[in-house]
Image: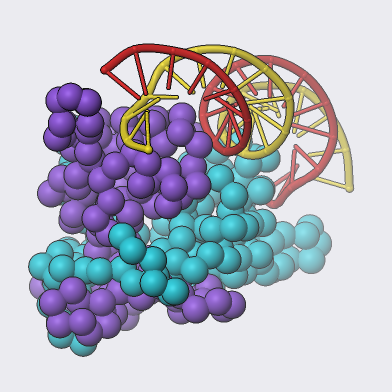
Chain colours: A cyan, B purple, C yellow, D red
Amino acid sequence: MDIDKLSSGTCAISRSLAFVGDAWSALILRDASRGMTQFDQFRTSLGIAPNILSRRLKALTEAGVLEKRRYSERPPRDEYMLTQAGRDFVPILAAMAEWGRRYNGGGSPLSELVDRETGKPVRALVVDENSGRPLHEVALQLVMPEAAPG
Amino acid sequence: MDIDKLSSGTCAISRSLAFVGDAWSALILRDASRGMTQFDQFRTSLGIAPNILSRRLKALTEAGVLEKRRYSERPPRDEYMLTQAGRDFVPILAAMAEWGRRYNGGGSPLSELVDRETGKPVRALVVDENSGRPLHEVALQLVMPEAAPG
DNA sequence: CCGGATCCGAAAAGATACTG
DNA sequence: CAGTATCTTTTCGGATCCGG
């Protein structure tokens, strides 16, 4: 679809989908959050063709969720690191993992999220920051600017 | 990419991406959460080609996040409703909206989420269900089954 | 008018080979 | 390693048509 239109639209959700409406991009962020930085790490982990990995890395870098950094001059070597925006997206991946486990968890054993410091399993839950209420208990209404009826 | 492989892989995140790694699917869920049920409502709201919409609705129905229900026999009319799985995905969309607002919020005024009952704005935050800590403050580690090094 | 199905050109994905 | 070039295959998206 038209990604440029998505990222400039009036819906805040669309603006995120501009990045992760593509599965590869989200999986790259996942691997980056696991500490991967190099082209070949991503390529091997994802089984992705190099040309499309290249394209995604460039797009994610231009979008500001990854940062390219040269860590060796001779030979020239670059690494990709999560920016603050990228790190802040990781909890959303965690929430997606929670959902995936609950509603599509059949078959083989699934990956788990743990707190790296305590070693305890983490269960992602989306709440309202103000009230603390879990959002799945709240009747949400998305209000578009300029009054668009639903 | 290969969606079937995604939805059967060992990573819980991948299993969610099988559904929303596609931007259209997520936007359909967004509109469904706004109360839309009919083919033409989605089509008009999204500006999507009918064949694509048809394909996505079928996929989302087979995936179990939408349910097709016939509400009129003559003429035959169907509506699409969120299932429990679909409703539980909405908080993730809310978290994505929050992120989109923070990191890609420039330009025109953006859509907002409000509590339909109180009318108050909702700020989505992903926390650990057990400790209550915001996940962006937690050092997360994704543990794959069968020990895969990062 | 609603809910699609069909057809076709354009675009993107994927595999593979190759280069600095 | 970290990509680029090239090629084939798949998917997308727009226009149009069809049955109820």
> Is B102 drawn above or below residue A39 in the view shown?
below
Residue B111 percent across, percent down from the top left? 40, 72
Whether residue A121 is visible to the viewer of this picture, yes or no, is: yes
Q: Nearer the viewer, residue B60 or B138?
A: B60
The image quadrant of residue A4 is bottom right
Q: Residue at x 34, y 72 (%)?
A: A143
Q: Residue at x 22, y 26 (%)?
A: B75
Q: Is residue A40 left or right of residue B71?
A: right
Tell me the quarter of the image containing the N terminus of chain A: top right
Residue A45 percent across, percent down from the top left? 47, 43
Q: Nearer the viewer, residue B52 or B79?
A: B79
Residue A42 percent across, percent down from the top left? 53, 48
Q: Residue furthest bottom?
A: A130
Tell me the quarter of the image containing the C terminus of chain A: bottom left
> Is B148 drawn above or below residue C7 in the view shown?
below
Q: Residue at x 71, y 68 (%)?
A: A70
Q: Nearer the viewer, residue A5 or B91?
A: A5
Whether residue A37 is visible to the viewer of this picture, yes or no, is: no
The image quadrant of residue A89 is bottom left
Residue A99 percent across, percent down from the top left? 21, 53
How many numbered circles are shown? 0
Q: Nearer the viewer, residue A19 or B144?
A: A19
Q: Is residue A120 left or right of residue B45?
A: left
Q: Residue at x 37, y 41 (%)?
A: B40
